[in-house]
Amino acid sequence: MSSGSTKGNNPELWDKLLSDLDEKLQLGLLDKLRRIQAYHFEGDILFLEAASDEDAAYLSRTATLQHLEVLAQDATGIRELRIKKRS
């Protein structure tokens, strides 16, 4: 399910998150995460780098970030989610 252009350190956990979003019909979030430029699981924190400024702005909105964080906590066991600005 993961994109070949996605770069990250734990593809199995990433695929579990995407699969859970798909199962829960969180299609808007799923679409944004499929376009993620990079992700990194570090301890109990998930860092995401959005592919565009628009995606970063959407994912950084308080309500969206909290919603995604709760879903990611359930799917992957992380404690916190952080959106990184594009490099």
Image (tube, rainbow, N blue to C red):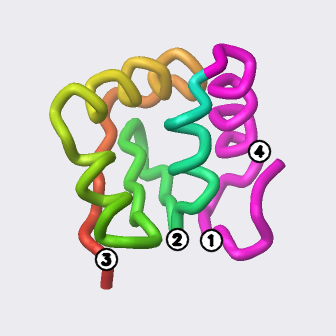
Amino acid at circle 3: Arg
Asked whether 8 falls inside the magenta stretch, the response is yes
Disc number placed over residue 37 in the picture, else none: 2
Asked whether 85 falls inside the magenta stretch, the response is no
Q: Earlier in the sequence, mark 2 or mark 4?
A: 4
Q: Closest to the observer: 79 or 62?
A: 62
Mark 3 residue element:
loop
Residue 40 on image: x %, y %: 49, 59
Residue highlighted by disc 1: 7
Residue highlighted by disc 3: 86
Q: Closest to the observer: 30 or 81?
A: 30
Callout 2 touching callout 3 (CB < 8 Å)? yes
Residue highlighted by disc 4: 12
Among the 4 quarters of the image, the one containing residue 75:
top right
Amino acid at circle 2: Gln
Q: Earlier in the sequence, mark 3 or mark 4?
A: 4
User: Alpha carbon of mark 1 to alpha carbon of mark 3: how far?
Assistant: 14 Å
Among the 4 quarters of the image, the one containing residue 9:
bottom right
Amino acid at circle 1: Lys
Q: Residue at x 70, y 75 (%)?
A: 5
Residue 21 on image: x %, y %: 63, 26
User: Alpha carbon of mark 2 to alpha carbon of mark 1: how far?
Assistant: 7 Å
Q: Earlier in the sequence, mark 2 or mark 3?
A: 2
Q: Earlier in the sequence, mark 1 or mark 4?
A: 1
Q: Closest to the observer: 82 or 77?
A: 82
Mark 2 residue element:
loop
Disc number placed over residue 54 in the picture, else none: none
* Viewer-nearest of discs 2 and 1: 2
Boundaries of the magenta span: 1-25
Task: Identify the residue at the far right of this view.
Answer: 1
Mark 1 residue element:
loop
Q: Mark 4: give few (<14), some (14-19) or many (20+) Cα within 10 Å.
A: few
